[in-house]
């Protein structure tokens, strides 16, 4: 069993921790230049991948012993928000692959992490979580195959993880807790076949292609528990949990999209006049009131997101674990932030009516925000699951006062 995590990283010990958001911001010009090239319409540009490698942006949540930064959730999220403000597909891909690489570094066996992280360059992982593969187990090895969707960034991945339901005859093998046994396995990218099927209205440049794992024999040391209940490392990410890291990454993408949409709308409104108008669109009462309302929603969503992520970071750094209430509140926040950011994107696009011709960042952001809000962590069930904990918090006597 792992010891409780107590932060000893450079980030915790230094009064000036590495600011990965600044590193991400330094890539903005390159990102905007490369993503404007039609040749990069389906995947993250190679130049951007290499620049993100150089800045260490794929390994923020990887333990230091494997060359990662073991960064806080806030540091991770702010970097991903910055990337997503430059280009939503770039932010989505790097966030998703950062989390996949986090899983590899924190949940795989020591033998396999050594295999993956001891190469000439740091690895990038693509992982999918739906257990659409099947495997059998015998004498320390699994034999399985499967087809998978949403392999974000798989074109430039070094390793790919697939989830496999372990079968006992024609039924899933059950664990002691009654759940089906599901294992993940990171394999070299060349072991899977990319099958395409990525013709989508939003997040087009994430290259989230389908892929197939042909029948393969996998030694058990290459696998991990797909429920992420057995970390093999002591780190921030292992302590906070995979789902919370996923929430942080995807919230950051949504916030980056909304931030860029508000900027583009304000910039266009300052330069545009309506028919017969003498003043810029930004001087009209209607634009003013609608803009400040949506800007306030964005700021409120961002404030709540970072409030909860900062609280999670503080608890983990002190050696604690997030309780059920804290996890459910992050899930609630994640769904709400996506809904707010989607609405901000729709408003920004319609507010200036100047995005009919392509390329259009506002038009792109509308679709990308809508796609982001379709992610499996963004759904009404997260609100329903969180409701008892949130209601109980407000029903407590302490809720009558802000003084605790």
Image: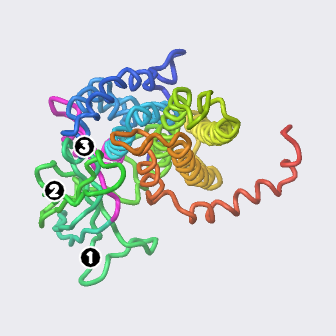
Point out which mark residue 69 bears.
Answer: none
Q: Residues within 10 Å of mark 1 (few under 14, many from 20)?
A: some
Q: Which residue is drawn at 30% across and 49% down?
A: 204
- Of marks 3 and 2, which one's residue comes earlier in the chain? 3
The quarter of the picture where the C terminus appears is top right
Residue with the mark numbered 2: 194
Viewer-nearest of labels 1 and 3? 3
Q: Residue at x 83, y 54 (%)?
A: 396
Mark 3 residue element: loop
Viewer-nearest of labels 1 and 2? 2
Expressed as whole percent of the image width and height from the top left, the position of residue 355 reads 43, 42
Expressed as whole percent of the image width and height from the top left, the position of residue 221 reads 22, 53
Residue with the mark numbered 3: 41
Q: Residue furthest bottom?
A: 170
Q: Which residue lies furthest to the top in this view?
A: 15
| Residue 238 painted magenta | no
State which region is magenta: 102-130
Q: Nearer the viewer, residue 106 or 4?
A: 106
Expressed as whole percent of the image width and height from the top left, the position of residue 275 reads 56, 37
Instruction: Determine contact: label 1, label 2, CB under 8 Å.
Output: no
Query: Can residue 240 be seen at all in this image of the molecule?
Result: no
Point out which mark residue 167 bears.
Answer: 1
Q: Which residue is drawn at 24% across and 46% down?
A: 42
Q: How crowded is mark 3: few (under 14 residues within 10 Å), some or many (20 or more)?
A: some
Distance from Cα at disc 1 to Cα at disc 3: 40 Å
- Of marks 1 and 2, which one's residue comes earlier in the chain? 1
Distance from Cα at disc 1 to Cα at disc 2: 25 Å
Residue 51 in the figure: left or right of residue 102: left
């Amino acid at each position: 069993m792992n010891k409780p995590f107590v932060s000893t990283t450079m980030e915790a010990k230094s009064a000036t921790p590495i600011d990965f958001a600044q590193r991400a911001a330094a890539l903005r010009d390159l990102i905007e230049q490369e993503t404007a090239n039609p040749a990069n319409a389906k995947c993250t540009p190679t130049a951007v991948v290499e620049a993100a490698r150089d800045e260490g942006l794929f390994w923020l949540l990887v333990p230091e012993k494997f060359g990662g930064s073991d960064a806080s959730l806030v540091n991770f999220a702010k970097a991903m928000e910055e990337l997503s403000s430059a280009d939503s597909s770039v932010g989505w891909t790097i966030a998703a692959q950062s989390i996949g690489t986090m899983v590899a570094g924190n949940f795989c066996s020591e033998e396999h992490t050594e295999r993956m992280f001891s190469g000439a360059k740091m690895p990038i992982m693509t992982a999918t979580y739906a257990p659409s593969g099947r495997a059998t187990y015998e004498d320390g090895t699994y034999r399985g195959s499967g087809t998978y969707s949403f392999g974000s960034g798989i074109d430039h991945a070094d390793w790919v993880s697939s989830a496999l339901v372990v079968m006992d005859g024609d039924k899933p093998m059950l664990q002691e807790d009654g759940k089906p046994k599901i294992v993940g396995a990171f394999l070299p990218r060349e072991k899977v076949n990319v099958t395409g099927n990525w013709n989508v209205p939003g997040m087009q440049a994430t290259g989230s292609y389908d892929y197939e794992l042909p029948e393969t024999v996998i030694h058990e040391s290459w696998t991990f528990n797909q429920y992420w209940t057995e970390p093999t490392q002591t780190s921030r990410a292992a302590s906070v949990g995979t789902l919370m890291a996923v929430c942080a990454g995807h919230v950051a993408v949504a916030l980056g999209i909304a931030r860029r949409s508000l900027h583009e709308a304000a910039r266009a409104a300052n330069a545009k006049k309506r028919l017969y108008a003498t003043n810029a669109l930004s001087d009209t009462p209607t634009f003013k009131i609608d803009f400040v309302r949506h800007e306030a929603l964005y700021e409120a969503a961002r404030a709540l997101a970072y409030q909860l992520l900062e609280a999670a970071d503080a608890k983990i750094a002190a050696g604690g674990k997030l309780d059920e209430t804290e996890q459910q509140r992050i899930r609630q926040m994640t769904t709400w932030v996506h809904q707010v950011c989607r609405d901000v994107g729709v408003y920004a696009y319609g507010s200036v009516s100047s995005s009919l011709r392509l390329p259009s960042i506002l038009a792109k952001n509308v679709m990308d925000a809508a796609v982001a809000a379709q992610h499996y962590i963004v759904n009404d069930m997260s609100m329903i699951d969180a409701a008892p904990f949130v209601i109980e918090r407000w029903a407590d006597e302490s809720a009558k006062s802000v003084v605790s």
